[in-house]
Image (cartoon, helix red, strand yellow):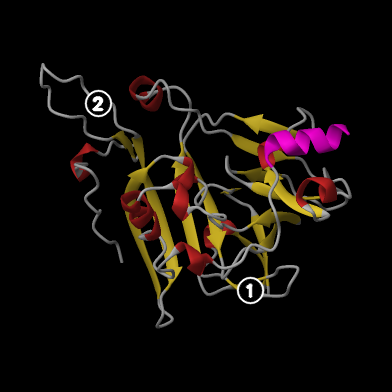
Amino acid sequence: MVYPHRAVAGLATDQIGPTGQTSWASQPDVRSKPRRVMPLTRRFEVSYLASNGDIDDFQRVAPATPLFEDAFSALGRGALISTVDGLTAVEDLLPGTFVETPQGPQQLLWIGSMTVFPESGELAARAPGHEPQKMVRVATDTFGLGRPAPDLMLGPRARLLFRSAACMHAVGAEEAFAPARAFIDGVSVIEISPLSPQKVWQLCFAGQQTYFANGVEVESFHPGFKSEAMHDREMSALFLALFPHVESFEDFGNMHVPRLTAFELENLRAA
């Protein structure tokens, strides 16, 4: 089922370009007032497990900001997810599937996806200040035998599990999630600038979970603590509308594993 686009701050659906991205409508050209530059927007796709057990899906246009993109861009096409029925490519997963985690099988409630576009072309011309979205490729056996296997392509917002006694001093635990880009070394973990549009995905469960992609521990989507306090009511409502299985930020559940920033991870690994 495809839901109609929600009206967002004057954005009309016919303003959406062939790439699925557009800039919000600017204010009318009134000479006494400067034109206001509005944020870039992006088309997001959602598939979720409804309360009656059915699988529903829809597409919406929303701001291309970290709040939204964090929820949709962890895994590249072909990432193999460990499920109770064996390895399944992320593009073939369905809500309701039981995914393997360190705490045992967890039911997948929500799958989100979006498209990452090349740096050049229409997007660069229309939004020169927009940060390019880049992928991260992790070579086979980078983190140990079979971790990953085979090579793993990650989206720009992926977070990977980092284990080290040094974490205890930073976050009070021996493991934490850190941005995948923080592991880039130019040899085994490299940054990829896509030459063509690339679809990326993220998974959501009840609470923060650790799932396995090609044998590597990846963080499921969770908005993090105090997310609601960092955004106004309108933006929070627009964001929550992309998650029909929750009604508030608290409904995303607990976070059992802390997070490190890329800067914090760099300092820990250098110590």
Q: Look at label 1 and name its amino acid.
A: Gln
Dot 1 falls on a residue whose secondary structure is: strand
Q: Quadrant of residue 80?
A: bottom right
Q: Quick one: which residue is furthest to the front in this view?
A: 229
Vertical placement of residue 121 versus 214, above or below: above
Residue 214 visible (yes or no): no
Dot 2 falls on a residue whose secondary structure is: loop
Q: What type of secondary structure mainly makes up the magenta span?
A: helix
- Near-viewer residue (190 or 102): 102
Residue at screen point 66% across, 48% down: 159
Vertical placement of residue 170 versus 249, above or below: above
Q: Look at label 2 and name its amino acid.
A: Arg
Disc 2 to disc 1, C-alpha distance? 45 Å
Q: Quick one: which residue is furthest to the top in this view?
A: 31
Q: Is residue 155 left or right of residue 147?
A: left
- Near-viewer residue (238 or 226): 226
Vertical placement of residue 233 versus 245, above or below: above
Instruction: Check disc 1 and report the residue beneath it.
Output: 106
Quadrant containing the N terminus is: bottom left
Mark linked to residue 36: 2
Tell me if mark 1 has few (under 14), some (14-19) or many (20+) residues whose alpha carbon lies within 10 angstroms of its own. Answer: many
Q: Position of residue 34 (x, y in %)?
A: 20, 19
Q: Is residue 15 left or right of residue 208?
A: left
Q: Which residues are magenta?
A: 261-271
